[in-house]
């Protein structure tokens, strides 16, 4: 007779609260189909931004940012993940595929897909209205995270191109226009906010799914665990006093 075999959880969409707290959160800024120009990542409470485009080096130095090759920084992050037993979380699998395309580094053994984690959270607990689309911006809106208008999606690539073009023509950060300098500041703030908001949402999702006991090991259905009250759409999700403030950084 057939027997029920526990399904092994997909590591890209399953993450524990302990893993979430220690994970590396990652976000790239780049032109389409090109190597990233800026790598933003956060480990616990420490956010780092590394410029990986040599043309942008003067702008990096003006903000006291590190300049490194893309391969160097991704190799370092994988080494940190391996030696310190940390997961690497980004929104969707984009960062994993881009890293594989533009370097010999493979993130997959450590990777967790933030979008899958957040969709799983919503499917199991219905903590808020259904997002109109499965984007980070929509999860922010539905979860009550207000993103400042000047840091909303849709401007990052244009800002990156504007700053890069001026630096390529003028060579020095001091020679950039005030508009170009403002765009660089906003691009860095946008990248930081993406990383921090992703971490906040994934932390909330992982804790609430674990806290309510809605998912057994490898479970694919939402059903109440022993001693827990949890059915799809019925969980009154509690507020989390530990959720960090989401005021825009540096502005």
Image (tube, rainbow, N blue to C red):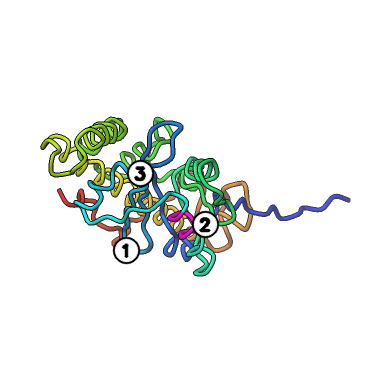
| Rendered image quadrant of residue 216 | bottom right
Mark 3 vs mark 2: which is more N-terminal?
A: 2
Residue 75 part of the magenta segment = yes
| Residue 153 against residue 78 in the figure, above or below | above
The residue indicated by pointer 3 is 53
- Tell me which segment is drawn in magenta: 72-77
Give the number of the mark in front: 3 or 2: 3
- Give the residue displayed 15% in from the left and 48% down from the top: 251
Give the number of the mark in front: 1 or 3: 3
The residue indicated by pointer 2 is 15
Mark 2 vs mark 1: which is more N-terminal?
A: 2
Does residue 119 appear in the picture of this structure? no
Question: x and y percent of residue 207 in the render?
Answer: 44, 59
Of residues 234 and 1, the one nearer the viewer is 1
Question: Crowding near pointer 1: few (<14 within 10 Å), some, many (20+)?
Answer: few
* Callout 1: SS: loop
Estimate the spatial distance between the alpha carbons at disc 2 and disc 1, rounded to whole Å.
19 Å
Estimate the spatial distance between the alpha carbons at disc 1 and disc 3, rounded to whole Å.
26 Å
Main SS class of the magenta portion in the image? helix
Give the number of the mark in front: 2 or 1: 1
* Callout 2: SS: loop
In-image side of 99 versus 148 (left or right)? right
Mark 1 vs mark 3: which is more N-terminal?
A: 1
Question: Crowding near pointer 2: few (<14 within 10 Å), some, many (20+)?
Answer: many
Of residues 121 and 64, the one nearer the viewer is 64
Question: x and y percent of residue 141 in the render?
Answer: 31, 39
The residue indicated by pointer 1 is 45
- Give the residue displayed 38% in from the left and 62% down from the top: 43
Q: Residue reaching furthest left?
A: 178
Does residue 137 appear in the picture of this structure? yes
């Amino acid at each position: 007779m057939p027997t029920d075999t526990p399904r092994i959880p997909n590591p890209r969409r399953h993450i524990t609260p302990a893993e979430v707290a220690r994970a590396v959160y990652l976000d790239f800024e780049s032109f389409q189909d090109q190597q990233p120009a800026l790598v933003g990542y956060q480990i616990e409470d420490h956010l780092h931004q590394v410029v990986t485009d040599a043309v942008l080096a003067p702008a990096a130095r003006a903000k006291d940012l590190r300049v490194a090759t893309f391969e160097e920084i991704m190799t370092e992050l994988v080494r940190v993940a391996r030696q310190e037993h940390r997961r690497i979380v980004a929104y969707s699998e984009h960062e994993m595929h881009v890293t594989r395309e533009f370097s010999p580094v493979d993130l997959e053994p450590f990777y967790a897909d933030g979008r899958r984690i957040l969709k799983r959270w919503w499917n199991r607990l219905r903590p808020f209205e259904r997002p109109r689309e499965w984007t980070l911006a929509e999860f922010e809106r539905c979860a009550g995270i207000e993103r400042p208008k000047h840091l909303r999606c849709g401007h990052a690539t244009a800002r990156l191109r504007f700053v890069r073009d001026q630096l390529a023509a003028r060579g020095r950060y001091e020679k950039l226009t005030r508009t170009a300098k403002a765009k660089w500041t906003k691009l860095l703030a946008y990248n930081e906010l993406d990383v921090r908001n992703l971490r906040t949402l994934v932390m909330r999702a992982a804790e609430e799914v674990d806290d309510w006991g809605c998912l057994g090991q490898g479970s694919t259905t939402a059903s109440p665990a022993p001693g827990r009250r949890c059915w799809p759409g019925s969980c009154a999700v509690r507020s989390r006093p530990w959720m960090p403030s989401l005021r825009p950084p540096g502005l």
